[in-house]
Amino acid sequence: MIRLVAGNWKMNGSLAANRELLDGIRSVEGVELAVCVPYPYLAQLAQRPAGLELGAQDVSEHAEGAFTGEVSASMLAEFGCRYVIVGHSERRAFFGEDDLVVGRKALAALGAGLVPIVCVGETLAERDAGAALAVVGRQLAAVRDVVGPEAMAGVVIAYEPVWAIGTGRSATSAQVGEVHGAIRRWLEDGGVAAAGVRILYGGSVKPANAAEIFAVPDVDGGLIGGASLAAADFMAICRAA
Ligand code: PEP
């Protein structure tokens, strides 16, 4: 399966800074590259390096109507998005998104022909309590229950331990391998065509640790936050995939 490396710019960028960043992005043989950008910059990204896929960082669960401030999946599709991140831990923690809302957002994305990048992952307290796999299983089950097992084959899953996001502290290869293997088995046991589902790792991936993380079985790419804002770092990570 073709690996996917997706940058999550979060709430960063400006027209000028984006142009400079995009100037440094080139396609990498055998790896799919994507950037998930703030909504206003989707139009700017109509012009982007060949082969670079476009994504957003959130989407409304609703199709249209009186939902001030929301952006629908069909709008994202109209602006050329292929991907949309749903359930990022920052959305769960700061904006109160629960498992059910994340499932509904994934369903809305699929309905518009987008590929949701479904983020799952435990907090440090949950890991310390030995609950990492249970939390990830619960988060995935909520999405599967909304979209159905067949549609689960069309999502990308990003395992992002909350304690590793933006902290500089990546999960170890053993921790990543354990969770990614468990996710693959969980998909298989749930009747999902799991072999084709890409499971990305996210959380403080940098050029220095990317190759080690991408060598872990069942890691099919990465979701890259901070390091996706510097073209040289992002490209080094993409080349390591
Ligand atoms: C993210 O926000 O999805 C992420 C993985 O961030 P970082 O790479 O900065 O830890």
Image (cartoon, helix red, strand yellow):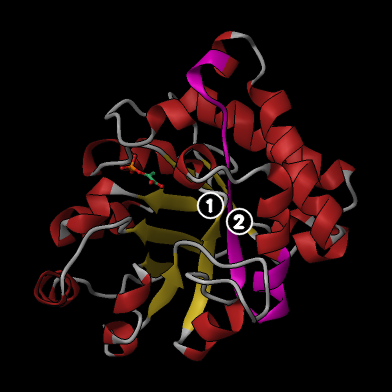
User: Circle 1 is placed at which residue position?
Assistant: 220
Image region (quadrant) for ligand 1? top left
- Name the quarter where the N terminus is drawn: bottom right
Dot 1 crowding, Cα within 10 Å, few <14, some 14–19, many 20+? many
Q: Which kind of residue does numbered mark 1 sit on? A: Asp
Q: Does the magenta stretch include residue 111?
A: yes
Q: Where is residue 191 in the image (x, y as percent from the top left)?
A: 90, 51
Q: Position of residue 58 (x, y in %)?
A: 50, 62
Residue at left 66%, top 62%?
105
Residue contact between numbered discs 1 and 2, judged by CB atoms under 8 Å: yes
In-image side of 137 versus 165 (left or right): right
Question: Residues under labels 1 and 2: Cα distance?
Answer: 5 Å
Could you say whether the residue bearing mark 2 is in a helix, strand or loop?
loop
Residue at left 32%, top 51%?
240
In the figure, 73 relative to 50: above or below? Answer: above
Q: Earlier in the sequence, mark 1 or mark 2?
A: 2
Q: Is residue 113 magenta?
A: yes
Q: Where is residue 229 in the image (x, y as percent from the top left)?
A: 20, 57
In-image side of 58 versus 184 (left or right): left
User: Circle 2 is placed at which residue position?
Assistant: 198
Residue at left 60%, top 84%?
74
Q: Which of 164 and 2 is in front in this view?
A: 164
Q: In which quarter of the image is residue 49?
A: bottom left
Q: Give the range drawn in magenta.
A: 107-125
